[in-house]
Amino acid sequence: MKIGLLTCERLPDLLESDQKLIPLFAKENISAKVVVWDDESVDWTEFDYLIFRNTWDYYQKEIAFNQWLSKIESLGIKTFNPISIIQKNKHKFYLKELEKAGISILPTIFLEKNSTSYLHDLIPSNWELIVIKPAFSAGSYLTKLINRSEIESIQAEFKEHFETKDFLLQEFRPEIKELGETSFIFFNGKFSHAINKKPVENDFRVQIQYGGKYTLIQPNADLLLQAELVLSKIPEKLLYARVDGIVIENKLHLMEIELIEPDLYFDLVDGARERFVEAFLKVLRS
């Protein structure tokens, strides 16, 4: 069996933590090759399966990425996670559906592109701080934290972006700085591990490139059930999923469910890579 581990041009060899999957697949008589998703020289028909890992530029190449997804689908190559999931998960308006299905999300306004609405009219008066981010994005791309006094200036600054992109406006909760964000990682629907991510002082972004600190944690049974409930709303079979949220008074408020190319924090917990490979084999058998 030959599989492709998908990455992007700026990480042509994958993250080191993901590279270590290759010998584990080899032990199962599976040849795993690192491949850049938009490398035009690739013959995709040589692969039996493709696994999304470090395709971290997809949101910057939206048209090309959508065309590539269609190409892989037309070739009949199975991907993990499935292309049907990728198509839905790459645009964060999926949070609307999850909220309708009973999942608690952070208070969010879904702003469609070319909206004629003024932000002042949309944002509730009790929101003191607001996070603005595109619906098609990753890694805090075009993400800003503003206070109410900056609403008019951000409307002008983001005018062109608002014309061409859908956006999310979310109430900023202080818990993100005080308690951090929690990520629950699942392989083949089963809980593997959880990570707490805290931003550095005077920042709100938890990503490691902005100084975020990551810590392995053991969530209590109630929180784990809440994360599992989020996952249960996805009907398709998943190789991996990362449920990200903020815990407020022991209630999980979903920020996003990452099903495309999330960092799975392999290096922070023993056995995670082995569980990933085992999950891949089980998904194939099922």
Image (cartoon, rainbow, N blue to C red):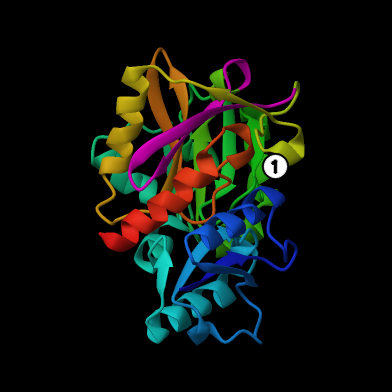
- Between 34 and 225, the residue placed more toward the observer is 34
270 sits left or right of 284 in the view: right
Residue 70 included in the magenta stretch of the image? no
Identify the image quadrant of residue 102.
Answer: top left
183 sits left or right of 41 in the view: left
Q: As displayed, is residue 118 above or below residue 239?
A: above
Residue 84 place in picture, x, y as percent: 35, 66
The quarter in which the C terminus is drawn is bottom left
Type of amino acid at the residue the image marks with label 1:
Ser
- Residue at point 72% right, 66% down? 12
- Between 39 and 70, the residue placed more toward the observer is 39
Q: As displayed, is residue 284 above or below residue 119?
A: below
Residue 262 at least partly seen: yes
Residue 279 place in picture, x, y as percent: 39, 50
Majority secondary structure of the magenta segment?
A: strand
Residue 7 place in picture, x, y as percent: 63, 64
Residue 195 included in the magenta stretch of the image? yes
Q: Which residues are magenta?
A: 177-200
Determine whether the residue tagged by mark 1 lies in a helix, strand or loop: helix
Residue 107 at least partly seen: no
- Residue at point 62% right, 84% down? 42
Q: As displayed, is residue 197 above or below residue 77?
A: above
The quarter in which the N terminus is drawn is bottom left
Residue at the far top: name it. 249
180 sits left or right of 222 in the view: right
- Residue at point 40% right, 56% down? 280
Q: As displayed, is residue 278 above or below residue 175?
A: below
- Which residue is labeled 1 in the image? 153
- Between 278 and 162, the residue placed more toward the observer is 278
